[in-house]
Image: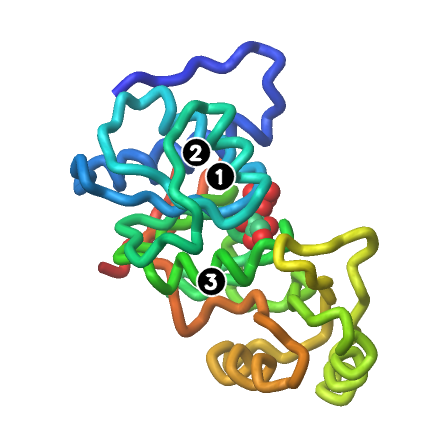
Amino acid sequence: MNMISYPMDTPASTCLRAKAAQVALEHVMKALTPSSVIGIGTGATVEVFIQLLKHSGATFSHCVSSSKRSSAALAAAGINELPIDQCDRVDFYVDGIDEGLSNGTTVKGGGAALAREKVLATLAMSFITIADSGRLKESLGEFPLPIEVLPAAELAVLRALQSLGGNPIRRKNCVTDNGNLIIDCAGLDLSDSTATELSLNSIPGVVENGIFSRRKADFMAFSDESGVEWFCRN
Ligand code: 5RP
């Protein structure tokens, strides 16, 4: 596999991300076939993965993207993409995370793409996450939970989240690719993450929330200055 060499002035965060992304790519390459479909998440980390994929020489069918942002990054890299609404199969889904536990539970949505990300992660045979080790946690909840909400339901959902003990704030200047808004909610109890994921989605007007507990990651790579730690469930 070809390795990318980064210029000397590359930000340290990019180099750190690249280490985890490289391990994720090697994991994917072990089972990649010419008919494989690769799902692509959203954010700075997965954009590093896109660059590595571009230079890997990997042979696969196509990618499917979770956002306009990632579609633009795939197009810039010259990687073939099929629109998400034509996608009924994903072999590998690769994405960044905002927080994660070693059991595969994650919180996502910092890039406002959580709804499409969850569709692709749930569809995928294998869900692979990449992050720096600061995002590996003992418990979830430090990162305010992103929740995608119908614009018409903003006030109703804010009130419902407050009644659950949360401190919700509408994200400024943010419209999702689905035309919705994002509420970031601190203060929720995420100790039973599956129950909270389900109960938040039962609030009328909530489109999706950023807890990925029912669909846990299968392979997680976390990088720091000394190397990459990874967890594999399957
Ligand atoms: C987007 C996400 C991202 O994967 C998450 O926010 C991490 O982003 P980055 O790689 O830019 O730190 O969930 O909705």
Tell me, yes or no, if residue 115 can be seen here. yes
Find the distance from the CA under tag 2 to the CA under tag 3.
Answer: 19 Å
Screen quadrant of the C terminus: bottom left
Mark 2 or mark 3: whose residue is earlier in sequence:
2
Q: Position of residue 133 (x, y in %)?
A: 50, 46
In this view, the residue in front, 134 or 67, is: 67
Q: Is residue 179 above or below residue 13?
A: below
Label 1 near label 3: C-beta < 8 Å? no
Q: Position of residue 56 (x, y in %)?
A: 31, 23
Q: Is residue 228 left or right of residue 161?
A: left
The nearer-to-camera label among 3 and 1 is 3
- The verdict on label 1 being within 8 Å of ligand 1 is yes
> Residue beneath label 2, please?
49
Q: Position of residue 207 (x, y in %)?
A: 60, 72
Q: Position of residue 205 (x, y in %)?
A: 67, 79
> Residue beneath label 3, please?
118
- Tag 3: amino acid: Lys
Mark 3 or mark 1: whose residue is earlier in sequence:
1
Find the distance from the CA under tag 3 to the CA under tag 1.
Answer: 15 Å
